[in-house]
Image (cartoon, helix red, strand yellow):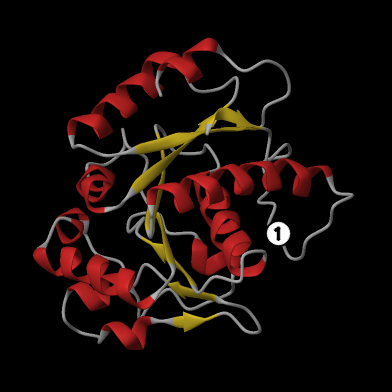
Amino acid sequence: MKGRASFLERDGQAKIITKPSPKSSFFGSFYNLYDQLRLIIKRQGIKKIMVASAVPGEGKTTIAINIALSFATMAGRNTLLVDANLKYPGIHKIFSLDKNGGLTDVLLGELELEEALKKVKSSNLTIITAGRSLQNPAGLLGSEKMKWTIQRLSSMFDLVVYDTHAITASSSALMLSPLVDGIVMVVHSGKTRREIVQLACSSIRNTEGNILGVVLNNREYYIPNYVYKIL
């Protein structure tokens, strides 16, 4: 997956796959990403992936949601989507779910893991929301309880997709990167500086994180050379 995924947002609004539509340009561009990712996951035996970005506002949450939905609907996999962006969670808003009763509550020992699972009606998708807000949630993602939670969820689902903080905005995403099987980087085409993306990718590699590929969001023209060089 070497930076070939096309635009996924043009107007700044979240575009979510509700059902396959071959005539839709949005579906077509996302299906290309799904197909590449599906082959990588199969070849490497991947069960847990993290969707990351260098800076906020690159469309990372939208990509994470659509990856989870595509594997749940098109592949029929038992898929879990986890909102690990504890400072600025957004998944609960898209699915009209209560944010509380989620990941932070589990990590604090106030809720059993199974009680945090929110099943999406008529689908193979389950969601864990971020949970109640905390002043300093970063330490939770590097805890032993988080490591246990990741392993437990991996045994319960075919695929687990984690949405996280932006790499340069919080250290918490780097705490997760060595605990997952692979990382999909999201880059907003024409907006994010090359040096920032390269710094984020270097930080991930320093934690022994496995970068699977780069999604260029909002791409209209060429693919910058640096996208290929950072892989």
Compared to residue 138, the image places residue 199 above or below, namely: above
The reply to whether residue 132 is in sight is: no
User: In this view of the protein, which residue sits in the foreground, 231 or 199?
Assistant: 231
Left or right side of 184 for 95: right
Residue 66 position, x and y percent, is: 60, 56
Kind of residue at badge 1: Ile
Compared to residue 7, the image places residue 75 above or below, namely: below
Residue at image position (47%, 78%) is: 98
The reply to whether residue 113 is in sight is: yes
The single residue placed furthest to the left in the displayed view is: 144
Residue 73 position, x and y percent, is: 65, 68
Residue at image position (31%, 37%) is: 169
**Dot 1: element:** loop
Image quarter of residue 29: top right
Residue 4 position, x and y percent, is: 61, 28
Image quarter of residue 231: top left
Left or right side of 11 for 207: left
Residue 171 position, x and y percent, is: 22, 42
Residue at image position (32%, 28%) is: 200
Compared to residue 105, the image places residue 159 above or below, namely: above
Compared to residue 100, the image places residue 8 above or below, namely: above
Which residue is identified by label 1?
17
The single residue placed furthest to the top in the displayed view is: 225
Q: Circle 1: is it few (<14), some (14-19), or many (20+) Cα within 10 Å?
A: some
Residue at image position (20%, 53%) is: 138
